[in-house]
Amino acid sequence: MLAELFSQASLMADDATGISVDSRLVQPGDLFIALAGDPGPRFNPSVRSSADGHDYLADALQRGAVAALVSHRQDVPIPQLETEDTYSGLWQLGTAARARLSGPVIAVTGSSGKTTAKTFLAAALKAYTPPGSFNNHIGVPLSLANAWQQAPAWVVEVGTSYPGEIEPLTQMVRPDLAILLNVHNAHIENFASRAALVAEKRTIFSTLPEDGLRVVHDELGLSGYRFGEHAGADARVLALSGDNMTLALFGEQMQARVPGGGAHRALTLSACLLAAKLLQFDLAPALDLDHNTVPKGRGNVVTASGVDVVDDSYNANPSSMRAALASFFATPAKGRRYAVLGDMRELGEESAAAHRELLQSLIEQQSLHGIVLVGSALAEAWEKLQQENTPEQDAGLPVLAVSAAATADLATTVTNHLQAGDRVLIKGSNRLFWGENFVDQLVERL
């Protein structure tokens, strides 16, 4: 259907240089796709809204869009291609765009680390990757539709929050190699069990043959080429000291720099090195990645007025929270250590226990000079611990503030406690910090 529409508008083939679904991000030459804020029952967006892309055609035109894909025409002087469902139109574009790529195409999924792996692979392989975390029903087809055809490789993230989301996206991507980084209890409230969550993640391999290029964490016990820390792994992390990793890749020992350090990033890098080896790329670039390769919000460090702000604000689940804290405590600090931690959402019945365990582990660690708690789950867990513990027991967790939200006032409060040489970690679920640009506010005040 879209092919017919495009053939009727020859200017599209000549003039359209990109695809956009957000009028604010339109670049000159883009085709603007008017999507509804509520896609209906077919998809599960994190937020449903009454917004409608059809209301923004004039803005898209003003910013340089050459045409728009719509489900009903608007009184705007821009060429409009009509289709019954613009979401289906976007998916058709993604599928058609994938057919233009000669390979290798790499798909990455996992509960955490997808964007970091994508960024590592982009740097190591000079691969095309989309900006940000384009891993859902909108982001994946956009990634393919905007892919630079001349790249030596392409890397696409595939995510899930509900059962049944990964497989149709994988069928669109049709990867030549797929990576399953890990399975944590992120979004577990939407799944019947952990086994159901693992089953959902492993559909990233659904379009590959049994002997295909499947890269999988060894702890999951799945078939494929394995990375991890156990004997028998094809890419085995032998040692990690600071940001230097010793790895055995198919038995050959090598040294690699781990951007940002941390055991979790070492595992991610080992998966990337294994993928590069299987695809017969030169490993040298992947062994010497720069620290700036760590993507924003995934543990990158921003220094302001002598304070190191560790920005891990993009998202959080119990496993990624433990990993971030372990890396934070293992990294030397000139001054004091602070943490601003937010709720870990979508944990369902496990939420109360997970937040309690987090705080209890920090009490036992006794390594923080001050901590700020953000969100109702952490506030409730802290209140219960205070009721159960003696003041001496709680002294291991110097709580400076408890807040319902990451507000501008909270950023000021945190700033007032910091001085040159200090190091502060910001981590919590996406909408708490990342969605509020909390780190930017904090850095601005510093």
Image (cartoon, rainbow, N blue to C red):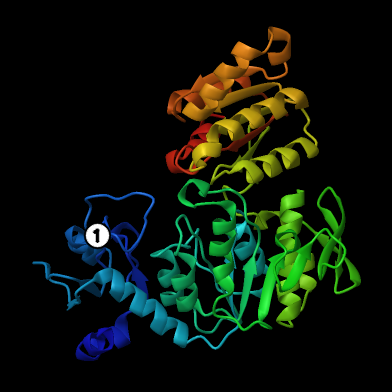
Q: Position of residue 406 (x, y in %)?
A: 47, 30
Q: Position of residue 25 (x, y in %)?
A: 35, 60
- Characterize the local packing of mark 1: few (<14), some (14-19) or many (20 or more) Cα atoms within 10 angstroms: many
Front in this rendered view, residue 157 or 308:
157
- 411 relative to 228, above or below: above
- 396 relative to 137, above or below: above
* Quarter of the rendering occupied by the N terminus: bottom left
Q: Is residue 394 visible?
A: yes
Helix, strand or loop at disc 1? loop
* Residue found at x 17% / y 73%: 78
Location of residue 81 (image quadrant): bottom left
Q: Position of residue 86 (x, y in %)?
A: 25, 70
Query: On the rendered structure, is 75 left or right of 281?
Result: left
Q: Amino acid at mark 1?
A: Ala
Residue furthest out toward the left: 75
Q: In this figure, which residue is indicated by the disc labeled 1?
A: 36
Count of numbered marks:
1
Location of residue 266 (image quadrant): bottom right
Front in this rendered view, residue 317 or 221:
221
Location of residue 208 (image quadrant): bottom right
* Residue found at x 90% / y 73%: 252
* Residue found at x 31% / y 87%: 14
* Residue found at x 67% / y 79%: 213
Query: On the rendered structure, is 161 left or right of 8?
Result: right
Q: Position of residue 242 (x, y in %)?
A: 83, 47
Q: Is residue 281 visible?
A: no
Query: On the rendered structure, is 393 left or right of 154?
Result: right
* Quarter of the rendering occupied by the C terminus: top right
- 314 relative to 148, above or below: above
Front in this rendered view, residue 125 or 319:
319
